[in-house]
Amino acid sequence: MKKFAIPFLIIIIVLLCNQCAKENKMIVTTNSESAKELYDEAGTAWEDYNFSQFEKLALETLKEDSDFFMANYQLTMYYLYFKNEDKFKEYGEAAVNCKAKLSKGEVLLKDAVSKLLEDSNADLTDLGKQLIKMYPNDADAYTVLSWYQYMAEDAEGYLETLKSILEITDKPASVYNMLGYTYMRLENNEEAEIAFDKYIELAPNLPNPYDSKGDYFMNIKDYTNAYEMYMKAHEIDSLFSFKKAMNAKAMVDSLGNM
């Protein structure tokens, strides 16, 4: 699935309070343990590129704690990425109007949301770099910067930040997916294939790695292998890749090679 970031995307997946502080991670504030659990589940869904599940869980998180800043922040970025302007403004305003006492990292992200509400194309790269200075050993801080670089269309900076994430993260699979698409964007197909193959190696039971490898094969006009990859993704999850597979098959048929 051709989604770069996400980060939100996307998108920060962290532990709570004292545990985070001990690991020099950005503290995520909530007084609800059930909200924290749902938030973590939403983060896992995002990493797996299960966006509908991410949205569902993030919304459930806010039912448990409506003033949960990071849940509002994640949904703000999610709806910005998928160009749902009404929802983007709704959750962006909820994030900015959050009354909870926030950590210093969350305060910085609140500033980022304020800038986006003023101009959805605002360049937030400097704020991302400030977050890294606050939390130089936190992979999630680098994820925030990478997303801001992606939005600013800074492919080279995005690539370097992804490489930095790989050096410190304990969840590298989705990073290889983003690397693969970035290398394709930079027309480095050799490195793109290496990254996508590593993604498959790390997450062989998920559909998205095969969908992404299918996109790679489409990019190099290897439609037969693209079809096979898309169908592999579809076999794992019937919601994945079928239209892409049919498009690849049509390309093969038109060339008379199937």
Image (cartoon, helix red, strand yellow):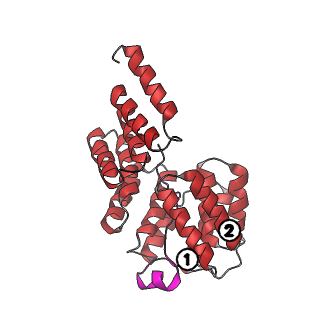
Estimate the x, y position of residue 113 in percent, counting from the top left.
Answer: 63, 64
Q: Report whether 161 appears left or right of 51.
A: left
Disc 1 residue crowd, few under 14, some 14–19, many 20+, Cα 10 Å: many
Residue 23 falls within the magenta-colored stretch:
yes
Q: Earlier in the sequence, mark 1 or mark 2?
A: 1
The kind of secondary structure the magenta stretch mainly shows is: loop
Of residue 164 and residue 228, the one placed in the foreground of this image is 228
Disc 2 residue crowd, few under 14, some 14–19, many 20+, Cα 10 Å: some
| Residue at image coords 52%, 79% | 16
Residue 250 falls within the magenta-colored stretch:
no
Circle 1 — which element? loop
Circle 2 — which element? helix
Magenta highlight range: 4-28
Which residue carries the number 2 mark?
62
Which residue carries the number 1 mark?
28
Estimate the x, y position of residue 76 in percent, counting from the top left.
Answer: 64, 59
